[in-house]
Amino acid sequence: MTRTLSRWLDTRFQISAHGSTVQREVVAGVTTFLAMAYIIVVNPAILSEAGMDFGAVFVATCLAAIVGTLLMALLANYPIGLAPGMGQNAFFTYGVVLGAGFTWQVGLGAVFLSGVAFLVLTVLPVREWLINAIPRNLKLGMAAGIGLFLAFIAMQNAGIVTDSPATLVAFGDLTAFAPVAALLGFVVIAALTARGVRGAVIIGMLSVTVAGWLAGEAEFAGVMALPPSPAPVLLQLDVVGAFEWSMVTIILSLLLVDVFDTAGTLVGVATRGGLVGRDGRLPRLRGA
């Protein structure tokens, strides 16, 4: 990285003023990408069950993450990566489309309307008032809750835990490669972190990835490829079809999940990153 670019990044995003360096932020950015990259496969996998094209949703997920993260950086100057979240996609597929019987086009129309309402609440600014009104102790609890939720998703994806009709959650096959590799990777990350090694998360992730290649559990398909066409889902939302009474509860549900889910995640991540002020408030909250 050239000195000119490094100085520009430092000045534009006030990196030194926040006690960090450009090099450290690069490592943190790569770590964040690797940690959230699972969504570009999981999101289209879930939405494809609603009838949406997998490849098109794959591209849309990538574009949404790019645009959202850039806006978070440029408008709020927060080092937080954004991407379509888990939960909303499951509600869309199993609740709106497969459960209520609406087409995915009408479902997208409902998502659009809830997004417009969310934008209005942000501009007013009702959302900012709501987040700042949350007591500090509750914010700390939300940070811990978000961490536990992410850990649970990670254990599900790794096969450490699985669904159970009797107890809701049960141990998976702990003799399989995926859970064993995940647990070993966690041990590596924890050990390196305890020793103060920078990039411990990246080292742990790459170690597990290489182990998967060597064991034949993961296939290396190359570095670059042309993306699928987004045409099957591009501008296919049916906003007019979403304007009916039966969609009101769905739109409100999407809006409430948007408001409180993003509030909890934002507060949790900001608290863990030391971005919350001494008064417990988040600076530049409206831009976030």
Image (cartoon, rainbow, N blue to C red):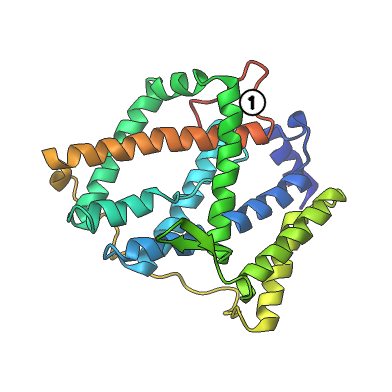
Q: State whether residue 282 appears in this view.
A: no
Q: Is residue 14 above or below residue 53?
A: above
Residue 116 vs residue 141: left or right? left
Is residue 235 at least partly visible in the picture?
A: yes
Residue 264 drawn at (x, y percent): 51, 34
In the displayed structure, 134 sits above or below 39; it is: above
Can you say whether 212 is above or below 15 in the image? below
Image location of residue 102, percent across then percent down? 18, 54
Q: Position of residue 49 (x, y in %)?
A: 31, 65
Q: Nearer the viewer, residue 114 or 204?
A: 204
Residue beneath the point at 61% across and 55% down: 35
Helix, strand, or loop for circle 1? loop
Residue lying at the far right in this picture: please name it.
195
| Residue nearest the observer in this picture, 197 or 138 | 138
Q: Quadrant of residue 216?
A: bottom right
As drawn, is 249 to the left or to the right of 275?
left
Q: Is residue 3 left or right of residue 99?
A: right
Residue found at the far top of this picture:
279
**Residue placed most toward the observer, 182 or 263:** 182
Q: Which residue is drawn at 44% across and 51% down?
A: 86
| Pointer 1 residue | 276
Answer with left or right where residue 150 lies relative to residue 250. Answer: right
The picture places residue 145, in percent across and down from the top left corner, at: 56, 39
Using the rendered view, name the quadrant where residue 44 is placed: bottom left
- The type of residue carrying mark 1 is Val
Asked if residue 37 is positioned above or below residue 257 in the image, the reply reads below
The quadrant holding residue 18 is top right
Residue depicted at x 32% and y 40%: 254
| Local crowd size for mark 1, using a 10 Å CA cut-off: few (<14), some (14–19), many (≥20) | some
Give the total of numbered labels: 1
The one nearer the camera, 189 or 48, is 189
